[in-house]
Structure formats: structure tokens, C-alpha cells
Image (tube, coloured by chain):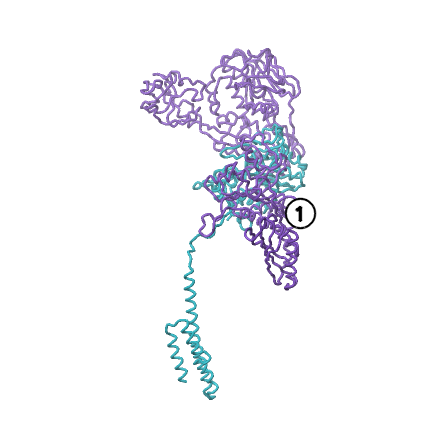
Amino acid sequence: MSDLKKIKDEFLLKLNENLNFNEINEIKSKLFGKNGLISSQFKKIGSINEEERKKFASDLNIIKDELLELIDTKINRIKNSEINEKLEKEKIDVTLPERSFVRGKIHPVSQTIDEISSIFSEIGFSVEEGPDVENEYNNFTALNTPDNHPARDMHDTFYLDKKKEKLLRTHTSPVQIRTMLKDKPPFKIIAPGRTYRSDSDQTHSPMFHQVEGLHIDKNINMGHLKGCLNYFIKEFFEVNKIKMRFRPSHFPFTEPSAEVDIGYEMKDGKIVIGEGNQWLEILGCGMVHPNVLKNVKIDPSKFQGYAFGIGIDRLAMLKYGIHDLRAFFDCDFRWLNHFGFDPLDVPTNYRGLSR
Amino acid sequence: MKITFDWLQDHLKTNFKEKNLLEQLTNIGLEVESVESLFAENELFKIAKIIKTEKHPNADRLKVCDVNVGERELKKVVCGASNAKEGLITIYAPPGATIPKTKIKLVTAKIRGVTSHGMLCSESELNLSDESDGITELSSKYEKKIGKSFFSKSKSNLIDLSITPNRPDCLGIRGIARDLAASGFGKLLELKEKKIKSKIKQTLKVKINKEKNQGCSTFGSCLITNVKNTESPKWLKNKLSSVGQKPISAIVDITNYVMLDINRPLHAYDADKIEKGIIVRNSNSGEEFVALDNKNYKLEKGMCVISDYKGVLGLGGIIGGTRSGTELNTKNILLESAYFDPSSVRNTAKKLNLDTDAKFRFERGIDPLSIEDGLHKAALLIKEICGGEISKIDIQKVGTHKTKVIKFDTNLFESVSGYKISVSEMIKILENLGFKCKKEKKHLKLTVPTWRPDISQEIDIVEELVRMSGYDKIKITNPIKERNKSTLNQSQKLFHFLQRAVASKGYLEAITWSFTDANYNMHFQGENKNIEIINPISSDLGVLRNSIFSNLIMHMSKNLDRGFKDLSIFEIGPVFTGKNPGEQNTVVCGLSSGKKSRLSWIEKERDVDVFDIKRDVVQTLVEAGYNYDEFFVDNETPNYYHPGKSGRLFLNKNESQAAAFFGEIHPNILKKIDIKAESLLGFEIFLDNLKISNKNLKNQKIKFNVSDFQKSERDFAFTVNKDVKAQDLVNAISSTNKNLISNIKVFDVYEGQNIPENQKSVAISVTIQSNEKTLNENDLENINNLIIEAVENKTGAKIRS
């Protein structure tokens, strides 16, 4: 009995000294090696009489566990501190720059087109396209703007031939004609794209972007037009309320025609859309003229509807506070970086148009 | 169109204020462009008297005047006019005033060392006349008004309206008043105009030739003899000045006044300068005349001219000539009031590049029934102001005006506008606009007023009714959120995918113009011919682009000049192959310049190279869903690429059209356009050559098929002739057993020591795996041998180890 206690006390004392890894291992084999002090006690168990045997075995096991645990703890502590010491030596300066990366950007006009498409997608419009080079018929005549109509003066047209039959489209409206000639009503399309006018100054660029809208069906009236644009403007500017004003105007291809103004105010040099009592013209629209429908072989007594045209660059300028239209096409690295969008920022319905 | 509320009130009785007027004008489609306060400006110009003049100490021609401007102290004003003398009553403009002619705002300034507090004005500076020789001299009756404002008070602001081309009637104040009245803004006043009561015959013979395409259908005229042309009376001068028109002489001012008031253009000839009589005819080719703008015009055949027996006097409805123009000493006047065909006027003006007020009005359509009204009104005014005798009115006609009648189905209004108004309200609006209305069973029978050439069918009537009852009455019908057709088609989806895929590889998206500089375009046009724009905005933007590279390189160069070095930009857009609609292709074009890992503490810097740009192209195409294993690359590229460091990629070996080009831009081009790039690489992906999958993702992802059997990697090294392409070795390997070979990767290419000249060593790692079993050594050995045999047979290579 006293043997066990003696061993225990002696080795607990020893183990509590400051030992290194080898010294602990030495103690471990002294106790638990083949002929170790504890191991040999276990061999004794068989020779102890039955009454004492149970208690002896139990005491021995307790001592064994206690010593082993202490030894393992000590060993682990030493191993850990060795690793820690090694890792400490491997320490590097993580404030050094990471490996270089480059970041691409999406042009604000492209982003705006995606936003517009996303909004109109919700209410069932699909996207149509047309060529940049148009014939005179699709661009003007079919749109109820015959030659010698003063309305042609509103468009400074780039021509590709002396006879003025081929031109760069002055608006996206010829896509209306192409779409209606190609299919049968109903039509519910938008057509974003490049447009051209030979006009170049601070606020005009010879190339700019428009989105055309066309909705032709039975019983489509001006209320639908107003509703559609009201919805679009609210969604696009991501505001709950919008002040919108329809004002009579004239376009040869729509009748009645309207220009649409939205209310705004200036706050700290920035335009705030939807409030205030100043008006900003943002688009032209109207009910498609019966002459246009007749030109594309649609019976105006059966089908009618609305069309609109919006300047995309101008929408982008208003929404994102861009002041200079010319900069859109100047390709200045700093500008593209500043106003561009991350390619992962795809405008979607569920996530919202913009972050 | 410039108007004032004052002038409007000659035709309109209303209790509303100017503020309401501005709103209402915009509400009925007569858009207010700007409102200018004339009075506030003009009030500053004071009647003043020069009390003393002294020679300027530092300038011989200048005088320093002490001027009484009605204040206690005299003002010191420096003046260069020779007629500035003591006692002269003139017009003084203080600092802060804007000189009407030059639009220059005066400030207190030192002139040759002497401070001048304002300025004494000439008539020309005030737009009173062309007199610019010396300062204005006012008569002694102004003595009592010294210190008062020279210009009479006008309470009205100058309102500038943007009149749409369909509304010629609103190019006259009365037309605007009529529209306002019909919209409920007041009452249109009846005109109680006097008529010419004369027994004298119009003795100058007028004849309209009956010929094809005669541009003049009616020519009304009267003679006014023994007039004395003079300065206009104050009311007339004020009226014209109030809308920004410069008074000239009574006769000119009166014709302008009638034109602005009722949109009836008139022309006054000096009757004594007309040879025998007036002939309205088509011009002969080569005829010439000097117009009132002092330019000589050479006419083409078939333009509508007013001539006498000597030659052309003027272009009908566009401009008169100097030969028969009225002057201050004109005694006898022939006053013309005619109807000219809009398209004839427009054609002629366009051909001669002439733009005049008369042309602007006639090409939009003048009321054919206003001919006599205009003559009555103008002739009587001339008689009143200039004296003389008026003849009877002479009217020559070759055509008759047809009254337009429209049968209007009143239900159309609601079906288009979406709201209702009563038939009686319709009738009220239309009658106020000058329509004659007759109610029939289901229709209104409407006679269109002659001043409305824009109205010819039912929808035009709907527009009038909506406009007048108010666009704010249109109720919003909210759109239904329903989609029956996909928003984008497959090729549009691909467009958007590629756009963002390329951007995600570090390229900034640019949008550049579809036209370009021919000098840049020529480097990149390949087989294409120049597609010229007939009327470019400048000669360096004269052609449609055959490639996006020209613009991108131009802008890349500008950015490099700004000091940026490592740059990648791209554009997705059209390039043109011909001048017909549809002869265009959509291309994604990218440029990358500079170095990778510039100034990196961790990685070695190097120039961007072909394999960077090839990765961008290949990765983009793979992301877009094309099968990497089928890609086929060769080095046939257009001449704007480096012939040795560029490639052409096909989606598979059987495609005839390349999906993309990539490589270094040809060094000669870089030299020619003098771009400061350390390296410049480009690519083009041709959307129209990419096969559009008709399978969407739903259909592509059906079966998940992978092998869980063990895979083995075997490395091979071959020596092979230098000109054999790595792709050939890879193809040879993959052709041996597509089922077992799951991956092939070239991991080393080596030339030099231990390798014969003209040969290279290519090391390839091949992954072999079966879907059915774990391959044993025997199987693997068989494949090894097959691979070696195939490569050696197909490429002439020899296995090294």
C-alpha cells in the first residue's frame, strides 16, 4: 500500500519540476515501461490475496490514470510550445500587398440598357433590334414623315449616298416598322440601340442611345401608355413616388403625341428625381398613328397602341449624376473606372436594379 | 415664336394672369421655351442730357462728358462719338445694363485712365435703327423727360414658344389666342377689321402661268400709290420690339406686324421697279437674281418665281429681290398676298440652302383664305401711316381650295384616350377651334378650318379633343405583370453574357462611335471598302468602321498619353461591311497593353503576351458554353495582327467561320499610328459566327455522369519538328480512345540542349480513366502504346522516354 502512495507522491513531485521532453519521457518509461514501477505493480495484482486485491487494483488504476494524465498534459504542452515557437519564426508581414488583380467595368450605358430591359421584362415586353444603317423608308416615310415634311428638319441625318436613300438611323423608331412588318399583332417590344444625328456640341453627341417602346393590341389606350411610363420611371429611378406630367406635342408617327416631364429639385448640386417643382423633359410618346399602322399592313380599326422613345444616355446621366454627355464616348480610363459598373452587378428583379 | 401677353390680349379677353398663361400654353402643347423680362432690362436706359464735354486727357478722339441722368450728381461718361456735344439730349446706359445689339453687360471701367460710369448709346446699339454713326440724338421735347426710362413700360414678358411643325396657325398671335380660348382660358375677340373701299383698279397686270407643278395657286395684290415711307409710329415700333423684332421702316414693319399677328406673310414691291407686270411661273434653268440677303442665286428649272417682263423678282414664299425692294423713297407699292404650295417652297429653299421667316411659314402651310384679310389689314395701315391711295384688290387663281370635311365617330375619342367627354363638350371645343360641326346619327360632320392643314382624319380630331380637355384627364391604367414571351432571345442573351464575361476578365467596357477616321480604319479594314458618310461632322469621322480596333486603338493611345500603362479595354458593338441595312456584324473587340505584375514585390513583371489574350478569349467562350475540347486554332489571321504571334480560333474543326482572332497588333501599325505601348494585344470575337445553342441550361443539365474508378496519370515526352503544333499532338492523343482519355495537358515545351536542331521536346500529361472498371497495368500499357503509336504516326514525333 505505502508503496503505491510513495510512488505517487514521489513522481508527482518530480513531474511538477520544470522538465524537458526527454526527461518526461524518461519518467514515463520509468513508470510505465516494461519493468516500470507502475507496470510491475500491475504484475503483482495476481499475488495479492482476494480481500485486498480489489482495493489494490482500484487504487493502482487511479494512480496510473492520474500520473498518465499529468505526463500527457506535460508532453502536449511542450509539443505545442515547440510548434508555436516554429510558427512564430515563420511570421510574415501581411500588410504587404496581395498579388495584383485587375477589375473590369461595364459601361453606364450598357448597365442602363440592362436596367431598362429588366424593368420592361416584368410587364411582358421583349427586346427587338434593328440595323444601324437604315433605308429612308423605314426611318421616315413609313413613320408618316414623307419627304418634304418639315419634321425631317428636326433630325439632322447622316446619309450614306447622294440620293439620300441609305442613312444612319436617327431614332430607334424604324425598329417598330421592322417588327410590325415581320410579325402579326399583338406587339409588345422595346428596342434599345445606337442612334445618330449630325449634331455635335456640348450637349449633343453625333451618336447616342435610345430605347423605343411599342405596344399594339386591341383596346390599348392612352391610359395604358401613362400607366406603363409611370411604372417605368418609378422603377428606373428607384423611388416610390414620381411627379410626372404629360404635355401635348407633335411627332409625325404618333397621334395624339405627348412629351413627358418629371418633377425634380436640386439638392446640394445634385438632381433629386420625383420631388420639387421643376420639370425635366425625358421622353416623347403617343398613340401610334393610323397611317403608320396602315404602312405595315395592320388594320387601325382593329388594332391600336402606343409607342415611346427615351434617350438612354440622358437617363443614365440623371440617375448616376453624370454631367457631360460627350464623356460617354471619350473612353477616358478614369471616367470608365469611375462611372462603370462591376460585371457582377447584373440588374435583376429579385435583387433590385442597383446595389 | 415670340409673343407677349399684351399682344395676345389684342385677340383674347381673359381674366387670368401671366403665370396661368405660361402653364396653359404648355398644357395645350404650345411649349414655353423661355420667358425673358424685357422691361427690367430696358428700364435701365435713361433719357439724359450732356451738360459739359472735355477732351479726354489721353486720347484725341475721346471725350469725357458730364451727363445729367436725372440724379443729383452728374455722371462722368467717356464717349467716342463725334456728335457728343454740350446740350445734346441722348440715351444713357448705366453699368449693369445689357446693350441690346451686342448683348454686352456694362461695367464701370477705366477707359485710357478715366473712369466711365456707363455709356451713351447709338441707335444701332439699341436696335432702334442701323444708324451707328454717333450717339442717338433726341429732340428737345425729351427735355422734360430727362432721367425717365427711354423705352416705354411694357408689363409683358417676352415669351418664347416652341411651335411644333404641324401648327402653322400658331405662328400668328391670333392662332395662339384661339387655342387658348378653346381650352377655356378666355374668349377669342371678334375682329372688326375695316375693309378696303376703293374704286381704283389695280392696274399692274398679274398672271399665274398654268403649268405643271405651279407652286402658286392664288396671288392677291393691291396697289398703293403716292405713299411716303417713313419711320413707324411708336405703337408699332413698340409692338415689334416687344417680341424682339427690329423696326425698320413703316412699310416693312407693317408687313411684319400682319405676319406676326395673323400669320399672313406679305411682300411689298416697289411698283415702279416692276417691268410691265407680274408673271408667276416656273424658273428656267440658270436664271439668276439677287435676293434681299444681297446674295446672288442661280436657279434650277421649275422653281416658283415671281417675275416681271425683265426677269426674276423673287422666289415665291421664300424671299424677295433687291431689284424691286421698297426703300424709304418708294412712292408706289404693290402689295402681294399669295398662297404657295408647302412642298414647292420647301424643295426650292432646300436646294438653294435658304432659310427665311416666310419660307418657315409657307412650308408649314398658310391659311389660303387669309389672302384678302392680310391685304385689307396691311393696306389700310399703310394708308394710315404713309398716306396714298389704295386700289381694289386683284385676285388671280389657278386652283381652288377644297374644304376638308371629316366624319368623326365620337366613340373613337374614348377608345383612344381612355376617358369620356360628352358630345356637347366635343362640339364646344371644336367650334371654338373654328370647326363647323353638324351632329349626325353616330357621327359629327366636321368642316376643318382652313388654317389647320394638319387636320385630315379622325385621329386628328381626337388629338384636338384630348389636347383641349387636358392630358391630365387621362387616367393611369397600371400595367399587368405578366410575361408571355422571353425578354431576350438566345443571341441577345449571348451578347449580354459575352459583354459581362469579358469585363470580368479585367477589361473596361468602352462605347465608341460607329464611325471613325479613314486613316485609322484603313489599317483594320481587311477586304472591306470604305463606307463613306456623305455629310460627316468632320473629315476625321468620315467612314463607318470596318473594325472596332480603329477607335479602340485611338482611345487606348490617348489613355497611354495620360500616363496610364497597363490597360485593358473592350467594346461590343457593330462593325460594317456595306452600306445596306443589315450589312453589319456584332463583334466583341478587346485591347490589352502594358505589363502583368508591374512593380510587384512578389511576382516577376512581364509584358502582356499572346497567351494572356488567348486565355481571355478561350475562357470567355468556355464560360459562354462552348466545348473547349472541340476548339481548333491555327495562325491564319488578318494582316493587322503580328503574322507570327496571332491565332484564329474555330469552335470546332468543321466550322468555316472563325469564332475569334487574337494576337499582337502588327508592329508596323503601332509605328504608323505612333502609339506608346510597351505591348499591345487584341482580340475579336464574332458573335454572328458563334453557333447559338437552342438548348437552354435546363436541357443541357440532364445527366450527371462521372466515373468513380481509379484514374491514372501518364506523362509522355516527344521530340518533334518545330513546325508541328502542340494541338496536333493533343489531337492525335485524344483520337486514340475518347472513352478512356479524360484529360490531356501540355506541360512543357523545350528547345535547345540535347534536342536536335529544328526539333522541340513537348511533354504531355494524359489522364486515363474508365467508366466501367479500374484499369489494370495491362490495359494501361495498351493505351500507352496506342498513344505513342498515334502521335508518332500522325505527327512524325518520336517518344523520348
Q: Is residue A306 above or below residue B68?
A: below
Q: Is residue A346 above or below residue B304?
A: below
Q: Number of numbered discs present?
A: 1
The cyan one among the chains is: A
Q: Is label 1 in a helix, a strand or a loop?
A: loop
Q: Nearer the viewer, residue B701 or A43?
A: A43
Residue B345 falls in which quadrant of the image? Answer: top right
x and y percentages locating residue A72 in the rendered image: 44, 73
x and y percentages locating residue B574 in the rendered image: 59, 39
Residue B467 falls in which quadrant of the image? Answer: top right
Quadrant occupied by the C terminus of chain B = bottom right
x and y percentages locating residue A53 in the rendered image: 46, 86
Disc 1: which residue: B654
Q: Nearer the viewer, residue B766 or A109?
A: B766
Chain B colour in the picture: purple
Q: Nearer the viewer, residue B734 or A201?
A: B734
Q: Residues within 10 Å of mark 1 (few under 14, many from 20)?
A: few
x and y percentages locating residue B255 in the rendered image: 53, 19
Q: Is residue B654 visible?
A: yes
**Amino acid type, residue under disc 1 in the picture:** Asn
Horizontal side, residue A227 vs residue A92: left or right:
right
Disc 1 sits on a residue from what chain?
B
